[in-house]
Image (tube, rainbow, N blue to C red):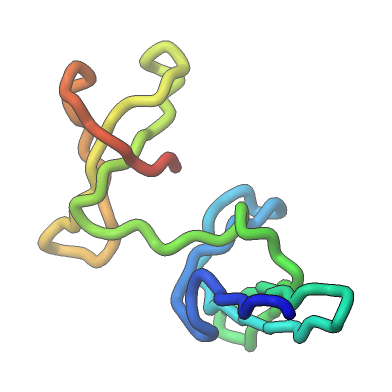
């Protein structure tokens, strides 16, 4: 008897999908399909994303690997930013939301400070 499988996020969750075509993270809605197992094969989970494509409709990507799906980066989150002008290295930073907009900004932190774990983008 196989154990139950659980998706890492629920169907319809807001996520970001890494597009190899556009080489960036794009907003999307997660699609989750739980495939029942058999006596020989365990159950599996297939992930897809629903992307909005401009003002006209949307498109779906199926069978997406988890390495191309992430929870959106939030406000006051530790991240790392790659900087070619600083010797092609990753620099510690934190996200913030400016008062006059909805986009996140990134503020570089003191490189000598203990930054713990963060997210790269």
Where's the N terminus, which quadrant?
bottom right
In x, y percent, where is residue 120?
42, 40
Q: Is residue 29 visible?
A: yes
Residue situated furthest left in the rendering: 99
Q: Is residue 4 left or right of residue 88?
A: right
Q: Is residue 110 left or right of residue 55?
A: left
Residue, x 56% and y 51% (percent of image)?
A: 24
Residue 55: quadrant of the picture: bottom right
Residue, x 25% and y 50% (percent of image)?
A: 77
Residue 30: quadrant of the picture: bottom right
Residue, x 63% and y 88% (percent of image)?
A: 57
In x, y percent, where is residue 111?
23, 20
In x, y percent, where is residue 76?
19, 52
* Nearer-the-camera pick, 58 or 113: 113
Q: Is residue 110 left or right of residue 73?
A: left
Where's the C terminus, which quadrant?
top left
Residue 89: quadrant of the picture: top left
User: In this picture, is 71 found above or below 50?
Assistant: above
Q: Is residue 99 left or right of residue 108?
A: left
Count of numbered badges drawn on the protein: 0
* Nearer-the-camera pick, 100 or 94: 94
User: In this picture, is 118 found above or below 25?
Assistant: above
Residue situated furthest right in the rendering: 40
């Amino acid at each position: 008897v196989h154990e139950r499988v659980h998706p890492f996020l629920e169907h319809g969750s807001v996520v970001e999908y890494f597009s190899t075509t556009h080489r960036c993270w794009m907003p999307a809605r997660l699609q989750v399909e739980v495939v029942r197992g058999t006596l020989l094969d365990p159950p599996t989970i297939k992930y897809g994303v629903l992307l909005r494509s401009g003002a006209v409709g949307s498109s779906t990507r199926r069978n997406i690997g988890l390495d191309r799906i992430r929870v959106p980066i939030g406000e006051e989150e530790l991240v790392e930013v790659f900087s070619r002008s600083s010797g092609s290295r990753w620099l510690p930073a934190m996200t913030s939301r400016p008062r006059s907009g909805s986009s996140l900004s990134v503020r570089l932190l003191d490189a000598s400070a203990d930054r713990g774990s963060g997210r790269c983008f």
